[in-house]
């Protein structure tokens, strides 16, 4: 055992080294005697030798625990204790282990384990936080029913004391909870404090009533309705779409202000970052409402995909996360516009996952080793993990997918599973061999798919040749061909569909597909009639695979697809590619804004047959980061300030050229009446907001100033403020906004974030100093830290301002945050993951700062692993 603080390299955990726990846990009883600095945790755990595992030493995880006493079968023992846990001699027969430990919730600033937030006790145990609560085999393949007793502090009784499962005796200053469903320790939760609930009920399809509660701090009760409503819709949807019913008499959500992540699916007691619970029209934007709906659904869906069927080990994280993200995406698509949801999801995938997959932090959907598991809650595990499920569903079809899921739940309920179990279910349900498909789980990197096209006029036949390759990623120099489903459509010269969308399955490095009369080897449209004139292919419809499509396409063809494609994703994609090409030429060649692009954009903006939400997306420009990536992919070095300037120039051009249609939209898209967060109203507001942002570039901000003054909801107020800040105005409005919302943490986060996100490169440093020096910059709160430091790093030109002052400032803050909250610090180091794209000067300055960070004495395992990988 180690007697020094572990350095990152000391503790690599490997998938291939998995071994089952040598004991079976029968049941677990815990008693908590709550105290802010000295909480006592009494545990009573039954163990029996595990016949399915080779015997080994008895080791229980435990970190930062003060052991008061321990016993086995009632006889006191003196275990050996290290930084990581406890070992002890135990009998070879079943036994009862009991321990009493003391922990300090108020000293726990890492927000992992039992901690305090605003005077309330709460827990976060995924992935390895339970070991900071008591000694336990803290690994997901050890599942047991839990009995919990909570005793409040005698001098300050707590009105609400919650844990997982169904309520037992609740008397005076104590509460008992019993969770009958065997669960891993990472799903344990406890909450105690002065809370109030907004409650409801849900009756399951089989008639079981469930009490629903959304717990918040007193004063926030009027901001819970949307979360509760989203929960009810999620429960209904999971019954209808997956035949999954809830399984306890209570389901609660608790909102917590200090939280490292979005939310957590603890059995029957979800704990949420308050940002994803609290919403009222005047404090939350349409995007906030949509996020709340999606995250409430996500955590609820985990009840089956994650909790009832859990992960054998943390390498299998995508088993629950990829599937649950896929399910929440389906849900949101059903609640709102499916194509708009798909475009949003692809935007997020490209912004976060492609970025990760094409840099030093690239890793497979199922990683093979890690040093700190908290660093692997990534876009690759979540979002690419969801894409892999989406491809599987596309390949086997919706019906077979449902049958496979039924089999999955039937076969694996109550188990801790692997990706092999998951794929076997699909093989058994469909008879398909998924061995090549499985590479999606083990091979990192974003595949490139090149397409070339030949048209045989005489035969009336179109041939497409696909070539796939995946660039090397850290530790994986050579890549094999993957199974890639390519959804394909064909349009004739008049813009009409010639055939229904077909799915081509790529399996080889190079593959030729013929479309038309008398097709040869292609399994595609073999009975299709002769194609009458040269058609335009629409490739990768619905973004049927998470790949980068490389295809030489003329601006005319893109404009044609933007005008005519019936696949909404590809229609949007055509416009996005056009915008990207135009901007890249503006940045690298100093070109003018292309008039063809402007007129194509105008056509879409004008087309009232199109959903406003879709038009809002079509009007949005690629981000600074997208452009940096595109320029880098094209073999050039992106210059952040030039990208920023080109985006501004194009926005001004759009504002000027499209002024007539934009001002019409600005007037017509006004949503009358009281605010409602539904998709249709939100879509109209999004289009109106996009119009306002462009118009503000040319109207001196008059519309935005007026809108700010009149706004009846946060979406319009914040939209107006953003439009003003981006044209260098809005100082008074900023002050007014602050005066109005000073006491509201979530709204003040927006106040900070908006300024950091819209600072120009020239003013970035001043803005950063002002924001971080603000007395309201409560940097130990993760939301507030992210709203300043995170938003600053997301503003590419500001982050990379040429003098490197923001690199230094961000690094200083990471050094300060790391000892307080390593998880959040480590996560923010990803700001640097794209550093190799930039010029030598910037790379030099970044390296200097990363090395400075890495040399910090006592740097956390979390941050040192991240910095090490980024620098490697
Ligand atoms: N499991 C949570 C989710 O995806 C995320 C999470 C991970 C939260 C680790 C906290 C800590 O729903
Ligand atoms: Zn999740």
Image (spheres, rainbow, N blue to C red):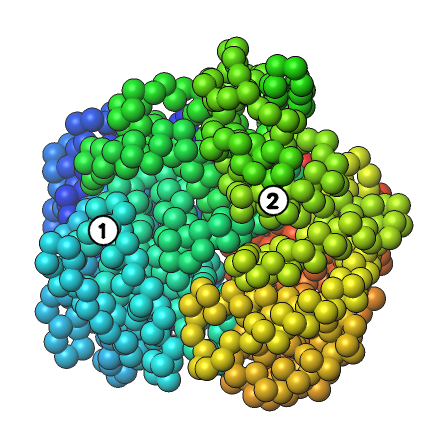
Q: Residue at x 35, y 32 (%)?
A: 397
Tag 2 residue? 564
For this rendering, which residue is in front, 40 or 390? Answer: 390
x and y percentages locating residue 470 in the rendered image: 61, 26
Q: Please determine whether, in this image, residue 700 is positioned above or below residue 597.
A: below
Q: Please determine whether, in this image, residue 30 is positioned above or below residue 861.
A: below
Rendering quarter of residue 711: bottom right
One can see residue 239 in this view: yes
x and y percentages locating residue 276 in the rendered image: 43, 66
**What number is the disc on residue 239?**
1
492 to the left or right of 633: left
Q: Residue at x 53, y 16 (%)?
A: 517
Q: Please determine whether, in this image, residue 395 is positioned above or below residue 152.
A: above
Q: Please determine whether, in this image, residue 401 is positioned above or below residue 734.
A: above
- Quarter of the image with the N terminus in it: top left
Does ligand 2 reach within 8 Å of label 2's beta carbon? no
858 to the left or right of 209: right
x and y percentages locating residue 583 in the rendered image: 78, 50
Q: Residues within 10 Å of mark 2 (few under 14, many from 20)?
A: some
């Amino acid at each position: 055992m180690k007697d020094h603080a572990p350095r990152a390299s000391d503790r690599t955990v490997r998938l291939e080294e998995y071994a089952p726990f040598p004991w079976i846990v029968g049941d677990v009883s815990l008693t908590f005697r709550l105290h802010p600095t000295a909480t006592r945790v009494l545990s009573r755990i039954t163990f029996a030798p595990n016949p399915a595992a080779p015997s080994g030493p008895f080791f229980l995880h435990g970190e930062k625990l003060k052991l008061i006493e321990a016993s086995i079968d009632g006889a006191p023992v003196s275990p050996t204790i290290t930084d990581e846990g406890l070992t002890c001699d135990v009998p070879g027969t079943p036994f009862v282990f009991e321990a009493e430990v003391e922990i300090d919730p108020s000293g726990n600033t890492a927000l992992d384990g039992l901690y305090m937030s605003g005077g309330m006790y709460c827990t976060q145990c995924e992935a390895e936080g339970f070991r900071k609560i008591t000694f336990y085999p803290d690994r997901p393949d050890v599942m047991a029913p839990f009995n919990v007793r909570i005793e409040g502090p005698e001098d300050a009784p707590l009105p609400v004391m919650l844990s997982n499962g169904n309520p037992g005796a609740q008397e005076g200053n104590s509460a008992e909870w019993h969770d009958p469903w065997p669960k891993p320790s990472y799903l344990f939760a406890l909450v105690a404090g002065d809370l109030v609930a907004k409650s409801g009920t849900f009756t399951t399809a089989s008639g079981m009533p469930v009490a629903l509660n959304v717990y918040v701090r007193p004063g926030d009760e009027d901001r819970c309705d949307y979360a509760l409503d989203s929960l009810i819709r999620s429960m209904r949807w999971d019954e209808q779409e997956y035949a999954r019913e809830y399984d306890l008499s209570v389901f609660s959500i608790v909102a917590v202000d200090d939280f490292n992540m979005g939310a957590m699916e603890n059995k029957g007691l979800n704990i949420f970052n308050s940002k994803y619970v609290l919403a009222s029209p005047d404090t939350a934007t349409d995007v906030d409402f949509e996020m709340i709906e999606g995250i409430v659904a996500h955590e609820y869906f985990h009840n089956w995909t994650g909790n009832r069927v859990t992960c054998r080990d943390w390498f299998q994280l995508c088993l629950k996360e990829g599937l649950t993200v896929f399910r929440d995406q389906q849900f949101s698509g059903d609640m709102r516009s499916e194509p708009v949801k798909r475009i949003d999801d692809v935007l997020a995938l490209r912004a976060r996952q492609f970025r990760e997959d094409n840099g030093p932090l690239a890793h497979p959907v199922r990683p093979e080793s890690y040093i700190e598991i908290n660093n692997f809650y990534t876009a690759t595990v979540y979002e690419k993990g969801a894409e892999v499920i989406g491809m599987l569903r596309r390949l086997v079809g919706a019906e077979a997918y449902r049958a496979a899921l039924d089999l999955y739940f039937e076969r694996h309920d109550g188990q801790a599973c692997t990706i092999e179990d998951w794929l076997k279910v699909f093989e058994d349900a469909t008879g398909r061999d998924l061995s090549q498909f499985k590479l999606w789980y083990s091979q990192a990197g974003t595949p490139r798919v090149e397409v070339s096209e030949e048209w045989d006029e005489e035969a009336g036949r179109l041939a497409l040749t696909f070539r796939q390759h995946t660039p090397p990623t850290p530790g994986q120099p050579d890549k094999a061909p993957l199974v890639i489903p390519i959804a394909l459509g064909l349009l004739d010269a008049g813009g009409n569909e010639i055939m229904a969308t077909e799915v081509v399955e790529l399996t080889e490095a190079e593959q030729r597909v013929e479309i038309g009369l008398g097709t040869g080897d292609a399994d595609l449209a073999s009975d299709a009639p002769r194609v009458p004139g040269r058609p335009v292919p629409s490739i990768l419809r619905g973004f049927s695979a998470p790949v980068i499509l490389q295809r030489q396409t003329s601006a005319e063809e893109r404009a044609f697809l933007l005008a005519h494609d019936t696949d909404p994703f590809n229609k949007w994609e055509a416009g996005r590619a056009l915008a990207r090409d135009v901007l890249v030429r503006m940045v690298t060649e100093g070109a003018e804004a292309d008039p063809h692009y402007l007129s194509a954009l105008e056509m879409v903006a004008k087309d009232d047959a199109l959903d406003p939400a879709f038009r809002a997306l079509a009007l949005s420009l690629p981000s600074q980061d997208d452009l940096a990536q595109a320029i880098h992919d094209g073999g050039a070095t992106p210059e952040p300030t030039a990208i920023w300037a080109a985006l501004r120039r194009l926005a001004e051009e759009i504002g000027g050229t499209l002024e007539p249609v934009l001002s019409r939209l600005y007037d017509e898209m006004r949503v009358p009446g009281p605010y409602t967060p539904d998709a249709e109203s939100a879509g109209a507001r999004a289009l109106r907001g996009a119009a306002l942002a462009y118009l503000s570039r040319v109207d001196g901000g008059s519309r935005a100033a007026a809108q700010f003054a009149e706004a009846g909801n946060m979406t319009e107020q914040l939209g107006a403020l953003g439009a003003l800040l981006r044209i260098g105005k809005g100082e008074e409005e900023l002050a007014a906004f602050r005066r109005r919302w000073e006491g509201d943490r979530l709204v003040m986060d927006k106040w900070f974030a908006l300024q950091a996100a819209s600072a120009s490169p020239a003013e970035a440093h001043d803005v950063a100093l002002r924001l971080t020096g603000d007395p309201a910059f409560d940097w130990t709160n993760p939301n507030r830290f992210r709203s300043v430091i995170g938003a600053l790093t997301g503003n590419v030109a500001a982050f990379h301002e040429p003098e490197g002052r923001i690199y230094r400032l961000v690094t200083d803050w990471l050094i300060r945050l790391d000892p307080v909250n390593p998880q959040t610090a480590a996560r923010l180091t990803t700001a640097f993951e794209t550093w190799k794209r930039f010029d030598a000067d910037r790379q030099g300055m970044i390296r200097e700062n990363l090395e400075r960070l890495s040399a910090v004495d006592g740097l956390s395992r979390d941050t040192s692993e991240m910095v090490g990988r980024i620098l490697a």
